[in-house]
């Protein structure tokens, strides 16, 4: 989530750097980009940097090494350009591949996604998850255990990566159902919080590495620093926390990375999730923004407990070291 400057020089919602850090949220790109607000916003939810807020929902064209466009932003993707998903047979007794779990009427990736990228028109290769998705190459989502998931990704890019894999971003209901499992528990593993079951509650890396003055933090230089997700003990490979699994077999849905979903913010979100009052009160103001869920490695219950954790403050073009995703698809 993003914090901005309000009333000229006051930080909105929280009055100290220490309190800001406890919330596990992020700051505007630069002080110059932050716009004064006439009143404090509940939950500290303000719009991300202006340039991101103006970006279109349509993904950028994919470009070849020679600069030619591979895929127009609004055109359908030619079949020969779509990276095929790793061939899989359906799991015994399930309409989903073994790498996906059945939740309701959808299949959901068991693990947070990483990217593969086509090099020079040839085979697909793993992509460094601590780098922004490539703007000059074709990429697609993959899901497997023991791999650091892709961070620094926007909702627009996550949706494109899922589409290139023959999948789609999950809806709020699909994601929430997979996290809570058959017993509809607050956490993937049960109803009571257990600190070491999921990758949550770690120290805040922006403070540790870039100082304790949030107004000095910059969007590109700090929130999207490749350093942050390469440090040992913070972002972990998928499935490393073996106890952070729901009854349907989906791992890391709480913690590790925030996960983008397909829904846009509107007032119906309150009928799909149990929202904290401060977040519910911001639904109209944040209408049309993107939604990510589950928290990341430096949060606990700031925006809801366990599977209820939801952030609604960001435009679909937003990305930082905490944002990731997983994909869904129809069964069969």
Image (cartoon, rainbow, N blue to C red):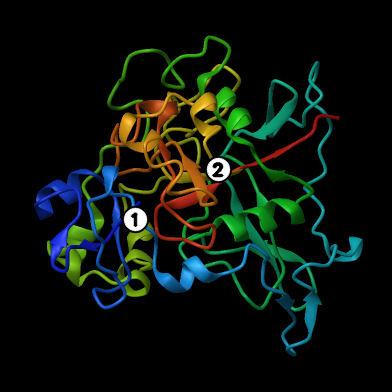
Outermost residue on the top side: it is 183
Do tag 2 and tag 1 residues touch (Cβ < 8 Å)? no
Please give the name of the residue rendered at 55% of the width and 43% of the height, measured from the top-left corner.
112
Residue 172's spot in the image, x, y percent? 58, 34
Quadrant in the picture for residue 171? top right
Please give the name of the residue rendered at 47% of the width and 34% of the height, measured from the top-left corner.
252
User: Is any part of residue 262 visible from this angle?
Assistant: no
Outermost residue on the bottom side: it is 66
Residue 243's spot in the image, x, y percent? 43, 23
Please give the name of the residue rendered at 46% of the width and 74% of the height, measured from the top-left corner.
51
Quadrant in the picture for residue 314? bottom left
- Up-down: is 264 above or below 248? below
Q: Secondary structure at mark 2?
A: loop
Outermost residue on the right side: it is 79
Left or right for 311, reference 150: left
According to the image, label 2 marks what residue?
112
Residue 183's spot in the image, x, y percent? 53, 9
- Which numbered dot is residue 314? none
Q: Nearer the viewer, residue 179 or 208?
A: 179
Left or right for 245, reference 106: left
Please give the name of the residue rendered at 77% of the width and 28% of the height, measured from the top-left corner.
96
Task: Give how far apart the Cα atoms at labels 2 and 1 are.
Answer: 27 Å
Chain-order first, disc 2 or disc 1: 1
What crowding class fits label 1: few (fewer than 14 Cα within 10 Å), some (14-19), or many (20 or more)?
many
According to the image, label 1 marks what residue?
46
Q: How many marks?
A: 2
Residue 298's spot in the image, x, y percent? 29, 44
Q: Nearer the viewer, residue 281 or 236?
A: 281
What crowding class fits label 2: few (fewer than 14 Cα within 10 Å), some (14-19), or many (20 or more)?
many
- Up-down: is 297 above or below 131? above
User: Is any part of residue 258 visible from this angle?
Assistant: yes
Q: Secondary structure at mark 1?
A: loop
């Amino acid at each position: 989530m993003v914090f901005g400057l309000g009333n000229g020089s006051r930080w909105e919602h929280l009055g100290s750097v220490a309190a800001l850090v406890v919330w596990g949220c992020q700051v505007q790109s630069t002080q110059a980009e932050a716009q004064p607000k006439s009143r404090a916003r509940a939950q500290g939810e303000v719009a991300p940097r202006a340039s991101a807020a103006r970006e279109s929902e349509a993904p950028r064209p994919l470009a070849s090494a020679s600069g030619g466009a591979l895929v127009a932003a609004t055109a359908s993707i030619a079949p020969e350009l779509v990276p095929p998903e790793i061939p899989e047979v359906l799991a015994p007794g399930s309409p989903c591949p073994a790498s996906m779990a059945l939740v309701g009427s959808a299949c959901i990736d068991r693990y947070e996604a990483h990217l593969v990228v086509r090099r020079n028109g040839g085979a697909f290769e793993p992509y460094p998850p601590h780098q922004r998705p490539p703007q000059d190459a074709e990429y697609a989502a993959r899901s497997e255990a023991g791999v650091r998931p892709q961070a620094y990704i926007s909702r627009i890019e996550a949706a494109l990566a899922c589409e290139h894999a023959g999948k789609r971003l999950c809806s709020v209901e699909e994601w929430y159902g997979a996290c809570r499992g058959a017993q509809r528990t607050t956490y993937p593993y049960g109803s009571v919080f257990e600190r070491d079951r999921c990758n949550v509650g770690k120290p805040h890396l922006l403070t540790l590495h870039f100082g304790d003055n949030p107004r000095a933090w910059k969007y590109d230089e700090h929130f999207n620093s490749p350093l942050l997700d390469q440090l040992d003990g913070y972002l972990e490979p998928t499935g490393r926390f073996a106890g952070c699994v729901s009854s349907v077999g989906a791992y890391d849905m709480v913690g590790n990375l925030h996960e983008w979903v397909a829904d846009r913010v509107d007032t119906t979100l309150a009928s799909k999730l149990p929202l904290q009052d401060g977040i519910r009160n911001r639904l109209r103001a944040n209408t049309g923004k993107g939604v990510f869920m589950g928290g990341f490695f430096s949060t606990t219950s700031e925006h809801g407990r366990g599977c209820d954790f939801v952030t609604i403050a960001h435009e679909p073009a937003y990305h930082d070291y905490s944002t990731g995703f997983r994909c869904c698809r129809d069964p069969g």
